Amino acid sequence: MSEACLYHDSESYQELLRFVVKLRNVAPFNAMILQIQKPGVTYVASSYDWWHRFERKPKQDARPLLILWPFAPVVTVYDVLDTEGKKLPEDAAMFPAKGDINEKQMSGFKLLVEKKTASVEYVDKGDSDAGRIERSIKSVKGKLLPTYRVKINQNHSPPVQFTTLAHELGHLFLGHLGPDKELSVPERRELTHSQKELEAESVAYIVCERNGVKAKSAKYLANFVKHQSTIPDLDVYQIMRAANQVETLLGLNEHTKFPSKKDRLTAVSDIQMKLLDT
């Protein structure tokens, strides 16, 4: 089939093979068809299976996915994110996150990011694809300037989307996409993929925990510490700086405030007057 040409490089081909291996409840060819229709799918089932095995049913506006079936042209199945009903175990979600972040707040964060840094696009993806950030270059008045686009899975809950936003902005401010003088972003593209992910997860952990969201970042970092006796060449300063930039961009700073010079002088004068009165 012509769609097979989508997998023209080794990375995308390996991703396809991993996906086919993981999705064991459908035939390999059907798994490939599902990956083409909705990248990131983690588990699918028929309406019948969802109800009789999990007491769940497709949402009203659920997107049906097509697979081939013996003695029938095609049949429909549904991604786990397109179902509702009895609660699934927390481990069933690829990116579990809980917190008070709601859709209205996410809309506000989107406006702030788009005003100062990057466009934000919600995309229809499966559970294993939370999002990503992309960099491109545009010409403005003869100057080549970087631009960014953040993609977030529209099917995830607001707390998960918030975690994804923090993670992807972390990549940006950590310099993983390249330098940006306007945003005070250093050049740090030389890091390995695992180093970049560990740093971005560290930024997401800091931002989420400080703002009431419990995300998978904590488990990710705990597992890393458990299985690694040494920390790879991480720049802790850059991680803390990037976390501060993400919080500042999203309007989440609640730093300790100090009195102005005038207020300090007034306070000292009041103390002196009280001492004179005694």
Image (tube, helix red, strand yellow):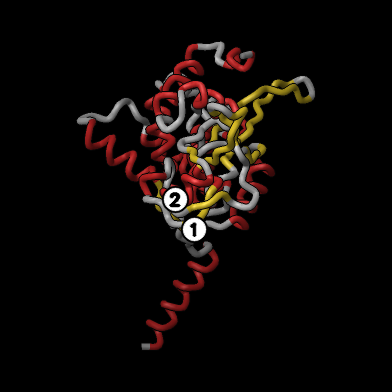
Question: What is the crowding at mark 1: few (fewer than 14 residues within 10 Å), some, or many (at least 20)?
Answer: few
Say which of marks 2 and 1 sits in front: 2
Please provide percent x and percent y for residue 5: 60, 12
Residue under numbered circle 1 = 254
As drawn, is 31 to the left or to the right of 197? right
Q: Residue at x 62, y 41 (%)?
A: 63
Disc on the earlier residue, 2 or 1: 2
Looking at the picture, does residue 7 appear above or below residue 100? above
| Quarter of the image where the N terminus is located | top right
Task: Give the residue type that dot 1 points to.
Answer: Glu
Q: Residue at x 62, y 27 (%)?
A: 73
For mark 2, give the secondary structure: helix
Can the viewer see residue 245 in this picture? no
Please provide percent x and percent y for residue 267: 47, 73
Task: Give the residue type that dot 2 points to.
Answer: His
**In the foreground, 222 or 146:** 222
As drawn, is 87 to the left or to the right of 157? left
Can the viewer see residue 182 in this picture? yes
For mark 1, give the secondary structure: loop
**What's the CA distance linking mark 2 and mark 1?**
49 Å
Q: Are marks 2 and 1 in contact (CB under 8 Å)?
A: no
**In the foreground, 228 or 88:** 88
Label count reads: 2
Please provide percent x and percent y for residue 113: 63, 43
Q: Residue 114 falls in which quadrant of the image?
A: top right
**In the foreground, 38 or 53:** 53
Q: Residue at x 48, y 12 (%)?
A: 10
Q: Residue at x 55, y 66 (%)?
A: 262
Q: Which mark is residue 52?
A: 2
